[in-house]
Amino acid sequence: MIKRNLLLGTFLVAFFSISSAQQSDPVILMTVGDRPVALSEFKDMYYNNLSKDSIKNPASLNNYLKLFIDFRLKVNAAIDARLDTTPSFRQEMGEYRGKLAEPKMRDTIVENQLIREAYERSKFDIRAKHILIKVGLDATPADTLAAYNKIMKIRNKIVKGDTSFDAASKKYSEDAYLKDKGGDLGYFTSMGTVYPFETVAYSSKPGEVSKPVRTQFGYHIIKVLDKRPDIGQIEVAHIMLRPTPKMSLSDSIRLKAKADSIYQLAKQGEDFAGLARKFSQDQSSSQKGGVLRWFCIGQMKQVPEFEKAAFDLKNVGDICAPIRTEYGWHIIKLIAKKPVQPFDSVKETITARIIKDPRFEISINSLVNKTKAKYNYQEYPEAKKEAASLIDDSFFRGKWTADKAKGHTSAMLTIGGTNFTVEDFAAFAAKNQMPGENKGADFAVNMLYPKFVKQCVLKFKNDHLEIEDPKFAAMLNQYRDGILLFDITDQMVWSKALKDTTGLNNFHNMHKGNYMWGERCDATVCTCATKEVAKNAKAMISDGKTDKEILETINGKNGKLISISSGKFEKKDNEMVDANWRMKGVSQDIEKDGKIVFVVVRGTLPPQQKTLDEVRGLATTDYQNYLMEQWLSDLHTKYPVHVNQDVLNQILPKQ
């Protein structure tokens, strides 16, 4: 598969390029068999694959025309062989189309705004408190209203001065972790919390109590305590001593004393990384010298004591005294720090985070709204009622089936002339049932309908990308033709040459003169560490010892005293053999590069044909070229090519 992808990539580079031209050009340049080829297709490829000087040259045009015709002939053959209908082809095209469509299935203007907004917010840290009244996104309207009224009453009490924010948090907040801390979240920065919450926090002034904001957790009111320039990211190392469950008081005191002693060693100049490897009980970092990944404010909020102590370190190399967290005792050293980076250097990282963040839906929702506006989106409320009439108790037990909507073809919505029916909604609903409390059919339909609409509009958008965007369609066609070109060529030439052993053997025999050895010398070249080694080697050769026996005897376990190269050498293969070509027997010693070299010449061989095994790679390549020529000849006969010369001449710049 890797080889296939590499070769396919070569074809795509050779034949295709992204065109900005519209593909609706009706001018036909040629016909290949009964298939017309537009001038625009050839022109785009010609202009993008040749240099500016070459495109002005009639000879370059004719040469490229020949290559292009051969390419179209092969694609014709692939189509007629139905290679574009195979499961593997359809899968590969589907995967490619999905990747190509991905950036077109969101509003890139809004996406870029979100990226820039996240960056600008990252320049500041926010410290805020909040009070939470829980209510799920799937709550009934009555429950939602009750939660909203409750949070508004709390806010009014705070704003009027009837109670403090801290007191209200302790009394009313349903954030079990923070309520007794006055709802204090500490400092956080961009993308450190859910988007609606973040937006209100960054738009509020310190001291203000916000109006309620809803998130997936419920309704919040927020009080910003501080907004400061972001202090950037830090890299720290730590040594952690972990207490055991139910540790006695005396053991706890000893553990703290051990932490203090390690801290003193570090302060006195002992290598911190070495101390971490020796003493730290954080297995994920100890063998890395205690070094943790870079983090910014808010990313260690689960361990606030650790985060505060780490950011309180001012200078690189500073070490804090042992601090206690729920995990144990920590000694922290500041390794490095860096401020907010320039936008261009962090844009890619922010983009990756945005795409994974729920706020990314804003970009998709914007595309949905623009698509609705462009394609005359219509809804039909009566069809919603029809759908609700089909929902029964089984839907809230996860047992409902779309069969209940069979034959219900009323349109629930229409976009661009395409209807999405009650049956379509039923299929969607069957995959998104709501096991649990029976909140009624109307509730179920109202909860699912916006998601259904979004899915339908996005499907319509995706299905019409080729119509909307000629460049997208051109890229798909180019990739399609590239796959077909590879597959048909592999079938008719490359793999065929490898598998057709009889044909390859016959081809080799028919072209014997192309595969000949020149005169060769049958010889052995011995390279020795010293003259003494050379002397011993010659004696063993005289005694009829084999190369293997000589190597094993002289080298033993050392393996460096002698090396031997035996074979049939052509001229210029080895200069030592060339120097003793006509000699027969053992040559004189020659010193070369600090070694002693001698040659044993057994004789010369006259020119002779190379066997197929000796020339298989070259012969296979030649056979493939032969098959290609024969195949193209057949294709030219099967698919007559007619070029409109007047249209072709339009491609050359006017003199």
Image (cartoon, rainbow, N blue to C red):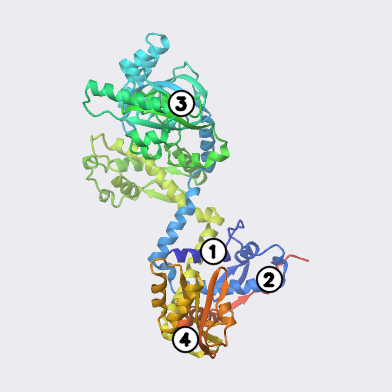
Choose mark 1 or mark 4, whichever is in front. 4
Identify the amino acid type marked 4: Thr
Quadrant assignment, res 46: bottom right
- Determine which of the numbered discs, if any, sits on residue 311 in the image: 3
The residue sitting at the right extreme is 655
User: Badge 1, how many Cα within 10 Å: few under 14, some, many 20+?
Assistant: some
Viewer can see residue 489: no
In whole angstroms, how far apart are the C-alphas of marks 4 and 2?
41 Å
Q: Residues within 10 Å of mark 2 (few under 14, many from 20)?
A: some
Where residue 595 appears, as percent x and y from the top left, is: 54, 70
What residue is disc 2 on? 60
In 3D space, how far apart are the residues under numbered discs 3 and 1 (Cα atoms)? 52 Å
Q: Is residue 261 visible?
A: yes
Which comes sooner in the sequence, label 3 or label 2? 2
Number of the label disc, if any, that sits on residue 12:
1
Query: Quick one: label 3, few (<14), some, or many (20+) residues within 10 Å?
Result: some
Residue 131 locus on image (x, y percent): 36, 20
Q: Residue at x 62, y 58 (%)?
A: 21
Q: CA distance from mark 1 to mark 4?
A: 37 Å
Gap between marks 2 and 1 measured at Cα: 20 Å
Please, is residue 418 above or below residue 604 in the view? Answer: above
- Residue placed most toward the observer, 136 or 496: 496
Q: Residues within 10 Å of mark 4 (few under 14, many from 20)?
A: some
In the rendered image of this protein, does residue 487 appear above or below residue 230?
below
Q: Mark 4 — residue?
A: 611
Q: Which mark is residue 248?
A: none
